[in-house]
Image: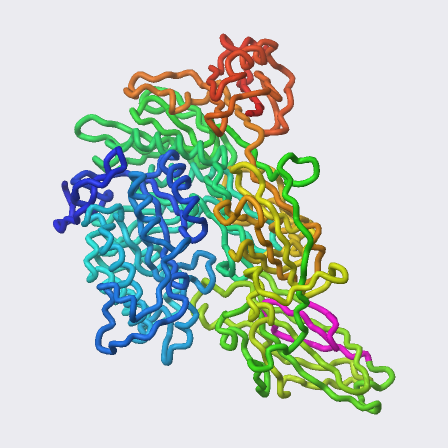
Amino acid sequence: MAGSRTAAVVFLLLAASASLCTAVSVDYDGRALVIDGKRRVLVSGSIHYPRSTPDMWPDLIKKSKDGGLDIIETYVFWDMHEPVRGQNNNDNDDDDDNNQVKFWQYDFTERKDLVKFVKLVAEAGLYLHLRIGPYVCAEWNYGGFPLWLHFLPGIQLRTDNDVYKAEMQRFTAKIVGMMKQNNLYASQGGPIVLSQIENEYGNIDWQYGSSAKPYIDWAAQMATSMNTGVPWVMCQQNNAPDPMINTCNGFYCDQFTPNSPSKPKFWTELWSGWFSAWGNPVPYRPVEDVAFAAARFYQNNGTLLNYYMYHGGTNFARTSGGPFITTSYDYDSPIDEYGLLRQPKWGHLKDLHKAIKLCEEAMVSTVGNTTSLGQNLEVTVYKAESGECAAFLANFDWQLDATVTFNGNSYDLPAWSVSILPDCKNVVYNTAKVNAITALTKFVPQSGSNSSVVSLSSWSWFKEPVGISLNNEAFVLPGLVEQINTTADKSDFLWYSLSIDLNANDPLLKEGSQILLHLDSVGHGLYAFVNGDLAGSGKGSSSNNKFSMDVPMNLEPGNNTIDLLCLTVGLSNYGAFFDTYTAGIGGPVQFKGLANGSTIDLSPQQWTYQVGLKGEQLGLSNGVSGQWDSQPALPKNTPLTWYKTTFSAPAGNSPVAIDFTGMGKGHAWVNGHGIGRYWPANVAPSNGNCADTCNYRGSYSNNKCLKGCGKPTQQQYHVPRSWLKPTGNTLVVLEEIGGDPTMISFATRELGLLCGKVSENYPAPLDLWDSNYLTRVTKPTLLLECPSPSQVIKRLQFVSFGNPHGGCGGYTHGRCRSNRARRVIHRACTGKTKCSIDVTVENLGDPNCGNVTKSLAVEAFCG
């Protein structure tokens, strides 16, 4: 292979039966990854193992493979695996290649079972990209670092610092050692074909000055010295040293160029959507634009692309970072948070992957030759000496459709689209023409007249004491302490308490005084209690987690208590020196509003501190510990209250969610498992740029397409089925602000209406193309398929062939439509699991639309 590096790497060829076979070579050259001596065009998708459960993994992996993926990509989450730094009993031997776990405290159980996840990927016949990092970003708490790193003497993270480098190397060696012991690298017959060290350091390395480049060079040398037998990558690192492959992350990477002609063009993160943050609308990204970005990348000599995310999942417990990242990490990905296919995104990208695979032989044989076809129009041709030819026609105008001539043929190109021609003649796919079905998902409440009612039994509760309750753990210090350094993130909560004795003549009680407690530079949130009563609260945001607030004070002669409960909402995960970002009360804390206009600074006073809550110390989250009350009456809308109840699981196998409508903010646990933070009281602004539909044409940004203005950022919270028993499940809730727990309800996530809309100028679905792509089926066809083989199409809600308007669930007839279409669809589809309908006048009848391009739109229910 011309240009291929001489050092070959051993790799497992995964057989069609998904069984492990003998090892073969893997390498890379300036064009592609080379597996068994053959260049490959590859499609990858991110699934983070701790954001779902082991019971979910096989189905997620299968759906990924069915969607056309070759590779599953995951980060490795250091904080999950080493939450507590162990004590090495041999100061002269830090080498953990031999898995000397007796010296260190590691956790690879349940959702943290990385080896099991990798083996499941292998069993499915897929490759794996292991992004060790060990910094991951990922909207994960503290970027995936365990917080104990912060407290090691002399440490500076992500720079040329010996203390940090020793810890980073030790953990990297631990993960590499585990993979080797289980024969999971390609060189051993395993699925791992790529590894990553560091992560997006190039975005911020300039801020680390002269120490940045030596650190990156060291990281590259350290990683390659571990002899994994697979190539290593560094994403967003333009100065990545050889043999590291530098890669691109972003919404678009078609213009990216590797830093050496001997390195292939890889895209490690094509952002399929965006994450959501408390208090903001929820972003989404139209599939037409995702497909456009992917096709443009492959058009411009890209050969490996990874969707971030392909399944986003859930930030269980306290794993979300940001701060202010929601519990849901759905990411508008092709497989949604609950494990259901997001259609048409999954299906339209599946078709794209099939189209790209038809071009693979031509693409890997040469580089593309791009020429202009007019303003914002171009064609790229891959033509091999052996005769294979593939072409990409692109119209990257934001508004204007176009007709172009290529090889003597005429082609219509919608604005912001790419057409793929695997034989340089026939269009098999256009990014703007979606053949895939649309499937609307919905939450079905499990209450009222629903046949699978989830009954919540009587509630019990525990009233969290206001202020210092763990006297043996409280401590007194002058001045205001920083929260993260004080709590070490063992809890979201830190009490700041002050007691003030006033006599009747004190200036604070003089007539005319309107005392306010002013708190400045507070992050991330705070509840202020005066003499035991909640007097005020405040919160930051994802864009600025610091805030100031003024709390009205009702002071009295005698003893007055001020108890400030400061809280974090996930630790920062991105930015240079993010490990030094602070939380808590920075100050000053002052009394304002005295009659004489002066202020009193409370900041230097002797404050009493307590890390965490009494309910946390009592272990109330497991639902077993005592001290629960059930008399005299259930307290509602009271702050700092723990609630406990039991419930039965919803019938069936559909994914389950808790709806926290009626509650404020807090944490929830089911059978001891942390569901995560809930915060339905944090509502997105009603005046945001939200719409049910979004024009996919033109450059995308995370603020372009939004939904949920004026609504809670997140209302439903995932409860994995594997965490539930048929009956006798325990729900524990810590409510911080105040809410009505009797309003909590359960719902199942269900697939509802199926829709399809295909126009007569669309390519035929790729599922219907002949194996010989030179002789194609050319009729546009609408395909409908129920989500389960046990279901059939029961009812047609809407059918129109002509010029229907609207979208799925809201189609309406246009000015012209065929009278025959509904009968044809009824005969072809009703009672069947799937059906296909040719979108032609001959089949559906003439709607008398004149020269207007005609479309068939169908809405159907399965049952």
In this view, the residue in front, 776 or 669, is 669
Horizontal side of residue 312 vs 450, given as left or right = left
Q: Tell me where residue 242 appears, x and y as whole percent.
A: 22, 58
**How many numbered markers are drawn?**
0
Q: In this orientation, does residue 543 appear?
A: no
Q: In this orientation, does residue 414 appear?
A: yes
Q: Tell me where residue 572 appears, x and y as whole percent.
A: 49, 65
In this view, the residue in front, 812 or 497, is 497
Q: Tell me where residue 559 appears, x and y as whole percent.
A: 76, 86
Q: Which residues are magenta?
A: 514-537
Answer with the quarter of the image where residue 353 lies. Answer: top left
Q: Residue at x 46, y 35 (%)?
A: 416
Compared to residue 358, the image places residue 331 above or below, namely below
In this view, the residue in front, 665 or 703, is 665
Compared to residue 123, the image places residue 81 above or below, namely below
Considering every residue shown, the one lying at the far right of the view is 511
Query: Is residue 89 covered in magenta?
Result: no
Quadrant position of the N terminus in the picture: top left
Horizontal side of residue 828 vs 235, given as left or right = right
Horizontal side of residue 261 vs 452, given as left or right = left
In this view, the residue in front, 701 or 309, is 309
Q: Tell me where residue 266 appears, x and y as whole percent.
A: 31, 47
